Image: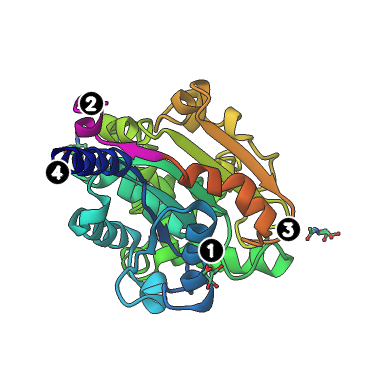
Amino acid sequence: MGKKRFGVAVAVAFLALIHVSVSVPFILIHGISAECSDHTNSNFPRLLTNLSGSPGFCLEVGNGKSDSWLMPLTKQAEIVCEKVKQMEVLRQGYNIVARSQGNLVARGLIEFCDDAPPVYNYISLAGPHAGISSVPWCGSAIWCEKAAKLIEKDIYTEYVQDHLAPSGYIKIPSAITKYLEHSKYLPKLNNEIPSQRNATYKNRFSSLHNLVLVMFENDTVIVPRDSSWFGFYPDGGANQPLLSVQQTKLYTEDWIGLKTLDVAGKVKFVSISGGHLQMATRDIVKYVVPYLQNQQTTAKGRNHCCY
Ligand SMILES: *[C@@H]1O[C@H](CO)[C@@H](O)[C@H](O)[C@H]1NC(C)=O
Ligand SMILES: *[C@@H]1O[C@H](CO)[C@@H](O)[C@H](O)[C@H]1NC(C)=O
Ligand SMILES: *[C@@H]1O[C@H](CO)[C@@H](O)[C@H](O)[C@H]1NC(C)=O
């Protein structure tokens, strides 16, 4: 009898020990013209869960597809921030996978969200981190440059900024003054304006354990595609040679902590052949899955470990 009880107690203690080590959950943030219920964004978290063994959820912003176009990114990031704080399962910290425009929401979540649980690993797939120099639906054809000229006239107006999500990260190199003055999202997210730099954003971003920046070599949606690594055109014009990430002031002056992370060996710059977000399973296994497999060991487990 006594022996049996002891055996049960040992078994319970053993189970408790196994239990303290749990997979860190992840959230998925989708891109523009997409929503959590569409084919891609409902399957992708399932695939990632299957491959990593970690629970994951697509987090919806507003009503999905139309809000991905029409709701300003400041608002989108606020919504995701509130959702994350309400999710019990994320309370101990979590990882983020984001697609395309969703990366700007993800970074807003990391940098702007007060009293939020910690983000450990952040995997960015085709994120327009340094902006896009032309409208997102047309690519790099000549007529696009003409269209961009027309759009340039209105893109930094209050109305467009408040009603068209991509206006928050359209950065027209020949209109930098207007961009810095009137763009309501990216200049803040990238701590671009000297008088308005906020060390809290930098502290939060540089607290990541791993940052994986995936660029797609044949991406024609993110222009320039190097923006997925924070590379961009110099101020002045899109006809000048691109600056690599390490040549940008965002990096050299470490506006958001990207250099800090890189020097600490925490940034993986990944380049994948293929078009926008076209990722083979073997690349997902190589570049995404390992960063979703971190374990959480609670302090309780460590302190009370007995046998
Ligand atoms: C995930 O695994 C389940 C169970 O094995 C399977 O039914 C499902 O099709 C898989 N989903 C994806 C997206 O791979
Ligand atoms: C910087 O951002 C934090 C977090 O949002 C905020 O609490 C603080 O007031 C900001 N500081 C300045 C100087 O704007
Ligand atoms: C990338 O684009 C080039 C030029 O259009 C093409 O030749 C190549 O096949 C493309 N590669 C992939 C992987 O899509």
Q: Which residue is mark 2?
A: 306
Q: Which residue is mark 3?
A: 274
Q: Which residue is mark 1?
A: 47
Q: Nearer the viewer, mark 3 or mark 4?
A: 4
Mark 3 or mark 4: name the one nearer the start of the chain: 4
**Disc 3 and disc 4: Cα gap in Å?**
66 Å
Residue 296 is inside the magenta segment: yes
Mark 2 or mark 4: name the one nearer the start of the chain: 4
Q: Residues within 10 Å of mark 4 (few under 14, many from 20)?
A: few
Residue, x 60% and y 28% (percent of image)? 247
Using the image as rendered, state which of residue 234 and residue 37 is in the foreground: 37
Q: Is mark 1 within 8 Å of ligand 1?
A: yes
Q: Which residue is mark 4?
A: 1
Q: For mark 3, give the secondary structure.
A: loop
**Disc 2 and disc 3: Cα gap in Å?**
52 Å
Mark 1 or mark 2: name the one nearer the start of the chain: 1
Q: Which mark is residue 207?
A: none
What's the residue type where badge 3 is placed?
Answer: Gly
Q: Label 1 near label 3: C-beta < 8 Å?
A: no
Residue, x 51% and y 60% (percent of image)? 50
Please state the horizontal and vertical placement of residue 32, each as a whole percent of the image. Answer: 47, 68
Q: Nearer the viewer, mark 2 or mark 3?
A: 2
Mark 2 or mark 3: name the one nearer the start of the chain: 3
* The residue stretch that appears in magenta: 295-307
